[in-house]
Image (cartoon, rainbow, N blue to C red):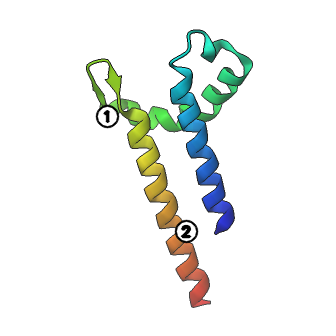
Amino acid sequence: MALISKAIQIYTYVLVIYALLSWFPGAYDSKIGQFIIRISRPYLSMFDRLNLSIGPIDFTIIVAIFVLQLAGNGLVIILSRLIYMF
């Protein structure tokens, strides 16, 4: 369970870094920026259809992190109960 929690925490950091890179012009063009995009875009693309923008502010990453945390915590609870049963 600790491994799953740690992986979710690291991926959350990746999503936060992705959001912060948008503040710096050309940051997505760097090698680190390209790596972050390659890791985060597949997950974030699931939320693109929801149109979570209000004016110039996009709340997609906030919702994605919230869903990731909920799903991760739910997975940990389910797995711990399954292990406890056996």
CA–CA distance between discs 1 and 2?
27 Å
Q: Is residue 67 above or below residue 55?
A: below
Secondary structure state at the residue bearing disc 2 = helix
Task: Kindly identify the residue that appears in the image at 71 percent across and 24 percent down.
Answer: 32
- Residue 74 relative to residue 17: left or right: left
Position in image of residue 2 (x %, y %): 66, 66
The x, y position of residue 59, in whole percent, is 35, 32
Q: Residue at x 67, y 21 (%)?
A: 34
Q: Is there CB contact under 8 Å for labels 1 and 2?
A: no
Quadrant of image for the C terminus: bottom right
Residue bearing the label numbered 1: 50
Residue 86 located left or right of residue 20: right
Q: How many marks?
A: 2
Quickly name the residue at label 2: 76
Q: Position of residue 9 (x, y in %)?
A: 60, 51
Which residue sits furthest right? Answer: 31
Residue type for callout 2? Val
Mark 1 Cα within 10 Å, few/some/many (few <14, many 20+)?
Answer: few
Residue 8: percent from the left, percent from the top? 59, 53
* Above or below 50: residue 81: below
Name the residue at the bottom extreme: 86
Residue pictured at 56% horizontal, 9% vertical: 25
Q: Nearer the viewer, residue 73 or 43?
A: 73
Q: Position of 34 compared to 58: left or right?
A: right
Which dot, 1 or 2, sits closer to the camera? 2
Q: Could you tell me which secondary element the residue under label 1 belongs to?
A: helix
Which quarter of the figure is the N terminus placed in? bottom right
The image quarter in which residue 60 lies = top left
Whichever of labels 1 and 2 marks the residue nearer the N terminus, that label is: 1
Graded by Cα atoms within 10 Å as few (under 14), some (14 to 19) or many (20 or more), the crowding at tag 2 reads some
